[in-house]
């Protein structure tokens, strides 16, 4: 079965570790006991992005976890890498950005990706493995398996209000209110006159079919600035 990739958008500059733990439990429950899923952290040009890789479809909003919006993505996360020596992660490094800073200044290499694989084996409990992917000065990607740090949910929680050097993927501040017209949209592209982005109500893109719309009874306004889809 093909893996699905979702990007996690944050609704605040500091999502606390307890909320990340709730998210891990929720995704594990949706994905299924004993079924692996991955959390990726991508760092590019000081831009931090979180992604979930799972075989299960995820809704845009998970229960009462309002700190996260989850959006389907087609990003390619996997790269050819060379296996390096294991990486000992001690309690001195509180977040992923501590690892980034250390390796950039001391070893002239940058942490590009973090892959955390979760193996839920019962309700509200899991095992996990973590890999760091570093880019060295020769542009090679070095994969290093992490040893230590069982509280990974604390490690991924970053306070961006203090780490002002880095940016994060924010939730969309503005989106079109499409919930009133979802009932006239469908997933059929045939005879469609426009495509509608209905996030954060649904993950998939829907279409307006001219056969399902009575132009004699209704009006429709199409158009927006900055190339925004309707």
Image (cartoon, rainbow, N blue to C red):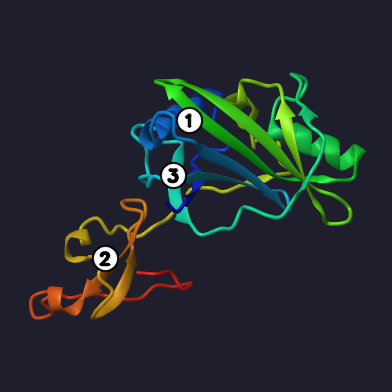
Q: CA distance from mark 1 to mark 2?
A: 30 Å
The answer to whether residue 227 is visible is: yes
**Dividing the picture into quarters, in which one does residue 220 lie?**
bottom left
**Dividing the picture into quarters, in which one does residue 162 lie?**
top right
**38 or 47: nearer the eye?**
38
Chain-order first, disc 1 or disc 2: 1
The x, y position of residue 215, in whole percent, is 13, 79
Helix, strand or loop for disc 1:
helix
Q: Residue at x 77, y 34 (%)?
A: 99
The answer to whether residue 19 is visible is: no
Q: CA distance from mark 3 to mark 2?
A: 22 Å
Q: Is residue 201 above or below residue 16?
A: below
Q: Are marks 1 and 2 in contact (CB under 8 Å)?
A: no
Q: CA distance from mark 3 to mark 1?
A: 14 Å
Give the labeled residue for mark 3.
69
Say which of marks 3 and 2 sits in front: 2
Give the labeled residue for mark 2.
187
From the viewer's perspective, tell me whether residue 45 is left or right of residue 115. right
The x, y position of residue 94, in whole percent, is 71, 25
Q: Are marks 3 and 1 in contact (CB under 8 Å)?
A: no
The x, y position of residue 2, in whole percent, is 45, 54
Q: Residue at x 31, y 51 (%)?
A: 201
Q: Residue at x 48, y 30 (%)?
A: 24
From the viewer's perspective, tell me whether residue 155 is left or right of residue 97. left
In the rendering, which numbered label is found on residue 205? none
Give the labeled residue for mark 1.
24
Chain-order first, disc 3 or disc 2: 3
Q: Residues within 10 Å of mark 3 (few under 14, many from 20)?
A: many
């Amino acid at each position: 079965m093909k893996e699905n990739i979702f990007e996690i958008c944050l609704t605040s500059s500091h999502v606390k570790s307890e909320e990340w733990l709730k998210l891990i439990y929720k995704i594990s429950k949706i994905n299924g006991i004993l079924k692996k899923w991955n959390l990726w952290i991508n760092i590019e040009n000081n831009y931090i992005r979180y992604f979930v890789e799972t075989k299960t479809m995820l809704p845009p909003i998970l229960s009462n976890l309002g700190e996260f919006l989850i959006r389907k993505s087609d990003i390619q996360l996997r790269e050819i890498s060379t296996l390096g020596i294991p990486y000992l992660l001690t309690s001195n490094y509180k977040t992923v950005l501590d690892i980034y800073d250390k390796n950039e200044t001391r070893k002239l290499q940058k942490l590009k990706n973090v892959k955390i694989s979760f193996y839920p084996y019962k309700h509200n409990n899991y095992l996990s493995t973590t890999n760091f992917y570093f880019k060295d000065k020769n542009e090679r990607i070095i994969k290093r398996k992490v040893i230590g740090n069982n509280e990974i949910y604390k490690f991924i929680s970053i306070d961006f209000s203090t780490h002002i050097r880095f940016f994060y993927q924010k939730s969309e501040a503005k989106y079109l209110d499409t919930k009133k017209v979802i009932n006239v949209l469908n997933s059929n592209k045939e005879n469609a006159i426009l495509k509608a982005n209905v996030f954060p109500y649904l993950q998939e893109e829907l279409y307006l079919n001219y056969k399902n719309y009575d132009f004699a009874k209704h009006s429709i306004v199409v158009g927006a600035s900055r190339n925004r889809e309707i």
